Image (spheres, coloured by chain):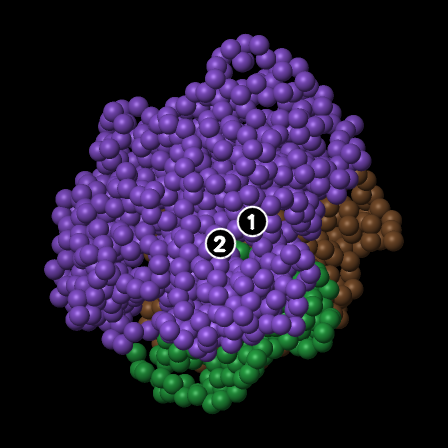
Chain colours: A purple, B brown, C green
């Protein structure tokens, strides 16, 4: 049901259904847990009931003696630390000396069946010395009695501190006409993908290890397996089956994946580990609980003079992506605006809670909420419209930020104009009745990290291989990871577009490290931009070979030929041409099956100061969302009625997928606003279940009007930029600011539950400050 | 996630059920729709060696306008337009229970006797072992209100308040025969989150009887929860009554989701009968109900907020009844 | 515990006979013993709806159903609601509207939607939202799922 796109392209820009859709709607798509291997054992994990304890001894004798038990593993067998960032390897597959949160893995069992495995876990005896636990990052900023990790700065639990200062913030504040301060407190949220974590591993007598896993970054898993197990990468094969959602939660190499492989090595049998839903909550790696302190200064007209920002970030038990998080909370607070003076201090502090990590729009969400609320407040104080304030501060295209980010394309001002007009903003803002409100929130996000985590910059960030034989089917190999966002489809579409062939000719192969060339996977919203460019390059190489053959067949110069649908033909006379297959078979005459390879690496960019590369990206997406909300002022309950989502992803290559990402992002962002939160009592997670972790229901979804206004990006594939993470950011402040317009209360903390709304309304009434006459 | 082994019994008559209950004395649970019991069993909450499935007991099945079998499925009630029109409070409550998938299996009896809920109870064995077991399962203390006597788990069924306000009666059968009592007397207001009904050991709910006198009487059920689906009630207010203009002819009010048991407020509502329910009196009345319930911090929303919502919901429920008389 | 005899029921229109102990859960039986892996395990506690099957035609949580209690009854899984060739109308609508993203919740939604459209030829948007409000989707925000079901209903089932 393709709709009409741009006349320049046959497929790109239309709505293209996901190529694996038919398999998914029939239950035929194969996820990790659907795979059965002969003789497969059940792997189970023993989790720590203590938040922080030193392991004195672990006795597995009884467990091992149980009939049906094939292996019991404890931490000392594979103690090599790992972690997604090479500079912060602080995790082990199984706890070695200490456990650091309730849910940390203490031991693992492989057994013939689930019941035997559980019986074995129950027979493991652990002797510990319970240590002080740390639930609040504020308690870990200075020296502590028992640092959670030896690497904490100066005997504290601080994992990472970032201090940056550009320009002269104090001078800017001294001359400012207006300034505001917003302090915000953000509960942790988690990905809650529907497919629980799952891994299968099998060690075979030929000395190889095969691992199937629900991962969004197969390559980093591959590396970590090699490092921890001490097996060269070429003897390990990582396969990514269909993955049931990730949102960042399957981007770290996770301990259960390594444990599963270790159990397979230990037993010589295939082993499957399914992580049950509760344990998925403990594995977490979700959005960091954060405490922000944001000060913004402007001149009399609302021109931004300076940001002064502090962030205290609750890291949980491990580093994970935390060093990046600590940078991002600063550097991603500025764009889409020009900020001439900027000071930031960010600290990420270990706590004895489930680890935080990367979640969709990582590092750019909580701080953005505080900034956008502050800007809304500034606009009110100055007496200008929130749209005008943002518009006059917009970063221009082809500019450089104060921290030396290279901004190429930006259609941010077009986003503002579109959402302002379509939402009827000028007729509604501050004019709707009490309880009804409208708000603006904006954002920007990296379109692929310029600084890949695990690679020398000289190697490509993405590679795509093509092979086409005489049948005319085109096999596509790449380690990019489709986790539901539609990257397989995009890969196929780009190749079909360049070659002029029908989509059904293109067969995207399952990710398999034996045959897929490396792409760094699905994180940092990098796939469309990086894989897209690599795919285009590969397809163009193949196209050129085919054009060459067509040129021979037609006795016309290549320069006189064009790619048409399933055909190569003369520019001058479309009737003169050869079919795709004719050209292919001619091209194959001397070499057999054709192959082609394309790669992408982002250009050099960023400053030379420490941490300069954090947040640099070959392009950025931009967003301006308007939300309209309706508040029940007696109960504090509210809903978002409608959202106008103006988004700049450059050229939308698959409109269906872009819309899906925006709608899904709005749903996920609304969840964080309306009620999703990891609720702790001390270090104990109170709600590790999908019943008590409040993902919004269909009835809570607003009507969403999507406004795609981006101009082509000069470096993106066919002008495209990311649309997977950036679309989440703006909805949160749009709703927060709409609530202010509705009831006159500034909500600085998330989530905004009905009781908080009511408390705010009460307070305003008590202070005798009526709003909209109420 | 597997279940620990148990023996499954499938009696075909109420007499067989009662006989089994005597034979298995205490070492069993009744299995109705399973949507409450089986998650609890998966979390190793108060496992018993025997399950007595009520599925095959013909007498417990089905419903009419006068009688709801204990095994009548909530989805069947929900889609019976005559029933939901005859008893609007029931109609509004049943469609609010959990999710459509839960209502497909969930039953009337199961919802009336749904296990009380608490953050410290509805957790896995691992979770509870980690904290230390509580009074309600495997332990001897309460984590909500620290003491060792009383359980504060919250009654979380939607049907009970909605049925109480239409003066429904419950029929139970047990080793000592059958008896029938007003539904609101099924619940033990002197009990707690563990012992919350007056059912004798082995007694089962056979049916709910709906009096003809209440048929067609205006009624409503308002449910407080975070999401419009899934969530158990953080508060449920049911009301039924007849107004003439603002004058109260009859009135019943019941509240669930706030205490360990659902309850009616007959003394309070009786005081309104034959009076004009002005806005001021309504305000005052709602405040009195609010003062009478005592939610604790064991569900998602904070207890102060839940308590405050009592008066808002009571006011809204009664306003709705009053307006339906006016229209 | 005495082990009960083989369990007999209709699965996707065909009689099956399979050993099942009392505590066996229908989801486990379907996935692990009968190797029909289209029915997904998302939470195991009746919340996500990924394990939805039709039990005597009614959408039911297979993770909260004892296998022994389907004795003599009819169970239809996603494999059973899928035609032998091609796709059903609602399946095609899910594909066309991009109502699948990661696809893990999709079989449950298809089973639920199939029953909805069987019983209500033209459900309203509100009725669709209510009907699917026991199936959790984390990717789509439900927008395209609702659109797909609306579109399938307009075409008639």
Q: Nearer the viewer, residue A385 or C68?
A: A385
Measuring from the top left, give residue A717's x and y in whole percent: 52, 51
Alpha carbon distance from label 2 to label 1: 9 Å
A359 sits left or right of B325 in the view:
left
Q: Nearer the viewer, residue A183 or B263?
A: A183
Q: Secondary structure at mark 2?
A: helix
Looking at the rendering, which quadrant does residue A212 occupy?
A: bottom left
Q: Is residue A477 above or below residue A186?
A: below
Q: How many marks?
A: 2
For disc 1, the chain is A
A393 sits left or right of C45 in the view:
right
Q: Residues within 10 Å of mark 1 (few under 14, many from 20)?
A: many
Q: Quadrant of the C terminus of chain A?
A: top right
C121 sits left or right of A714 in the view:
right
Q: Residues within 10 Å of mark 2 (few under 14, many from 20)?
A: many
| Residue to which mark 2 is pinned | A532
Measuring from the top left, give residue A470's x and y in whole percent: 44, 77
For disc 2, the chain is A
A513 sits left or right of B293 in the view:
left
Q: Residue at x 51, y 27 (%)?
A: A401
Q: Is residue B303 above or below residue B256?
A: above
Q: Residue at x 57, y 39 (%)?
A: A409
Looking at the rendering, which quadrant does residue A348 occupy?
A: top left
Task: Report if the CB atoms under discs 2 and 1 are less than 8 Å apart.
Answer: yes
Measuring from the top left, give residue A325's x and y in whole percent: 41, 36
Q: Secondary structure at mark 1?
A: loop
Q: Quadrant of the N terminus of chain A?
A: bottom right
Q: Residue at x 25, y 24 (%)?
A: A154
Residue B310 visible to the viewer = no
| Residue to which mark 1 is pinned | A720
- Residue that lies at the very extreme toward the front in this rendered image: A555
Residue B212 visible to the viewer = yes
């Amino acid at each position: 049901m393709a709709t009409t796109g741009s006349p320049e392209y046959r497929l790109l820009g239309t709505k293209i259904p996901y190529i694996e859709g038919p398999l998914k709607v029939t239950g035929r798509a194969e996820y990790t847990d659907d795979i059965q291997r002969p003789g497969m054992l059940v792997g189970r994990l023993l989790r720590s009931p203590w938040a922080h304890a030193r392991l004195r001894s672990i006795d597995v004798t009884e467990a091992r003696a149980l009939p049906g038990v094939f292996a019991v593993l404890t931490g000392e067998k594979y103690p090599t630390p790992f972690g997604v960032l090479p500079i912060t390897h602080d995790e082990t597959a199984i706890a070695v000396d200490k456990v650091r949160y309730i849910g940390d893995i203490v031991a693992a069992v492989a057994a013939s069946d689930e019941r035997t495995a559980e019986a074995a876990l129950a027979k493991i005896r652990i002797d510990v010395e319970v240590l002080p636990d740390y639930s609040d990052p504020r308690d870990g900023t200075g020296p502590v009695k028992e640092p959670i990790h030896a690497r904490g700065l100066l005997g504290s639990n601080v994992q990472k501190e970032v201090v940056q200062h550009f320009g002269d913030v104090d001078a800017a504040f001294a001359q400012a006409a207006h300034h505001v301060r917003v302090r915000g407190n953000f509960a942790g949220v988690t990905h809650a993908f529907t497919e629980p974590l799952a891994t299968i591993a099998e060690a075979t007598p030929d000395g190889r290890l095969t691992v199937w896993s629900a991962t969004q970054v197969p390559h980093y898993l591959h590396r970590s397996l090699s490092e921890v197990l001490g097996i060269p990468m070429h003897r390990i094969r990582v396969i990514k089956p269909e993955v049931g959602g990730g949102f960042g939660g399957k981007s770290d190499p996770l301990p259960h994946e390594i444990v599963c492989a270790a159990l397979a090595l230990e037993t010589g049998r295939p082993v499957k580990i399914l992580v049950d839903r509760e344990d998925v909550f403990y594995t977490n790696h979700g959005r960091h609980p954060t405490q922000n302190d944001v000060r913004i200064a402007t001149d009399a007209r609302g021109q931004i003079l300076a940001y002064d920002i502090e962030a205290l970030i609750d890291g949980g038990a491990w580093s994970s992506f935390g060093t990046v998080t600590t940078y991002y909370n600063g550097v991603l607070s500025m764009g889409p605006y020009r900020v001439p003076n900027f000071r930031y201090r960010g600290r990420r502090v270990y706590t004895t809670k489930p680890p935080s990590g990367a979640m969709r729009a990582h590092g750019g969400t909580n701080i953005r909420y505080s900034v956008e609320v502050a800007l809304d407040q500034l606009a009110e104080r100055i007496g200008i419209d929130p749209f005008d304030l943002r518009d006059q501060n917009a970063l221009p295209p082809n500019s450089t930020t104060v921290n030396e980010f290279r901004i190429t394309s930006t259609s941010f001002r077009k986003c503002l104009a579109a959402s302002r007009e379509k939402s009827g903003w000028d007729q509604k803002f501050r004019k709707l009745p009490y309880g009804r409100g409208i708000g603006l929130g904006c954002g920007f996000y990296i379109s692929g990290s310029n600084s890949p985590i695990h690679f020398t910059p000289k190697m490509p960030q993405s590679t795509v291989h093509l092979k086409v034989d005489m049948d005319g089917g085109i096999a596509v190999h790449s380690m990019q990871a489709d986790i539901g966002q539609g990257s397989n489809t995009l890969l196929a579409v780009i190749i079909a577009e360049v070659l002029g062939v029908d989509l059904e000719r293109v067969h995207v192969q399952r990710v398999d490290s034996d045959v897929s060339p490396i792409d760094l996977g699905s994180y940092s919203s990098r796939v469309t931009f990086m894989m897209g460019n690599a795919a285009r390059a590969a397809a163009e190489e193949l196209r050129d070979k085919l054009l060459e053959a067509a040129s021979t067949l037609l006795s016309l110069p290549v320069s006189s030929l064009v790619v048409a649908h399933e055909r190569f033909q003369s520019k001058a006379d479309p009737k003169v041409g050869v079919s795709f297959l004719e050209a292919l078979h001619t091209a194959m005459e001397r070499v057999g099956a054709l192959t082609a390879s394309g790669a992408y690496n982002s250009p050099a960019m960023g400053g030379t100061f420490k941490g300069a590369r954090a947040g640099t990206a070959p392009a950025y997406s931009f967003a301006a969302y308007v939300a309209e909300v309706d508040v029940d002022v007696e109960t504090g309950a509210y809903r978002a009625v409608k959202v106008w989502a103006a988004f700049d992803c450059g050229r939308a290559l698959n409109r269906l997928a872009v819309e899906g990402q925006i709608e899904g992002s709005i749903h996920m962002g609304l969840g964080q606003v309306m009620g999703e939160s990891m609720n702790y009592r001390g270090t104990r997670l109170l709600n590790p279940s999908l019943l008590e972790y409040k993902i919004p229901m269909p009835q809570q979804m607003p009507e969403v009007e999507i406004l795609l206004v981006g101009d082509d990006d000069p470096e993106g594939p066919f002008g495209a930029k990311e649309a997977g993470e950036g679309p989440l950011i703006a909805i949160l402040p749009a709703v927060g600011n709409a609530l202010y317009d509705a009831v006159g209360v500034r909500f600085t903390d998330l989530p905004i539950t009905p009781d908080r709304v009511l408390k705010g309304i009460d307070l305003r009434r008590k202070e005798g400050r009526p709003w909209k006459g109420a | 996630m597997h279940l620990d082994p148990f023996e499954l019994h499938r009696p075909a008559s109420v007499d067989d059920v009662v006989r089994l209950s005597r034979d298995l004395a205490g070492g069993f649970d009744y299995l109705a729709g399973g949507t409450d019991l089986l998650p609890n069993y998966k979390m190793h909450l108060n496992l018993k060696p025997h399950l007595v499935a009520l599925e095959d007991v013909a007498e417990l099945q089905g419903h009419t306008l006068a009688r709801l079998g204990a095994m009548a499925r909530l989805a069947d009630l929900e889609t019976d337009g005559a029933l939901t029109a005859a008893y609007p409070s029931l109609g509004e409550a049943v469609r609010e229970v959990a999710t459509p998938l839960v209502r497909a299996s969930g039953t009337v009896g199961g919802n009336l006797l749904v296990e009380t809920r608490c953050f410290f109870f509805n957790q896995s064995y691992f979770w509870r072992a980690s904290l230390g077991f509580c009074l309600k399962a495997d332990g001897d203390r309460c984590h909500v209100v620290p003491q060792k006597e009383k359980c504060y788990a919250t009654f979380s069924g939607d049907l009970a308040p909605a049925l109480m306000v239409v003066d429904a009666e419950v029929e139970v059968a047990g080793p000592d025969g059958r008896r029938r009592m007003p539904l609101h007397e099924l619940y033990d207001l002197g009990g707690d989150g563990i012992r919350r009904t007056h059912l004798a050991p082995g007694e089962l709910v056979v049916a709910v009887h709906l009096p003809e006198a209440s048929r067609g009487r205006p009624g409503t059920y308002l449910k407080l929860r975070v999401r419009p689906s899934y969530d158990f009630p953080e508060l449920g207010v049911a009301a039924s009554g007849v107004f003439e203009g603002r004058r109260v002819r009859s009135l019943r009010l019941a509240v669930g989701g706030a205490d360990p048991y659902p309850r009616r407020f007959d003394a309070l509502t009786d005081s309104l009968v034959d009076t004009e329910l002005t806005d001021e009196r309504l305000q005052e009345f709602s405040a009195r109900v609010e003062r009478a319930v005592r939610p604790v911090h064991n569900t998602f929303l904070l207890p102060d907020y839940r308590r405050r919502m009592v008066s808002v919901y009571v006011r809204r429920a009664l306003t709705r009844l009053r307006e339906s008389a006016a229209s | 515990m005495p082990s009960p005899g083989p369990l007999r029921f209709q699965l996707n229109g065909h009689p099956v006979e399979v050993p099942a102990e009392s505590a066996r859960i229908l989801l486990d039986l379907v996935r692990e013993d009968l190797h029909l892996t289209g029915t997904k395990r998302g939470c195991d506690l009746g919340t996500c709806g990924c394990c939805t099957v039709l039990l005597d035609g009614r959408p039911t949580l297979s993770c909260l159903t004892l296998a022994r209690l389907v004795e003599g009854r009819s169970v239809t899984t996603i494999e059973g609601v899928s035609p032998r060739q091609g796709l059903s109308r609602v399946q095609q609508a899910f594909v066309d509207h991009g109502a699948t993203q990661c696809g893990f919740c999709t079989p449950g939604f298809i089973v639920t939607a199939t029953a909805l459209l069987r019983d209500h030829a033209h459900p309203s948007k509100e009725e669709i939202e209510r009907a699917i409000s026991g199936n959790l989707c984390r990717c789509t925000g439900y927008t395209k799922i609702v659109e797909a079901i609306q579109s399938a209903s307009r075409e008639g089932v």
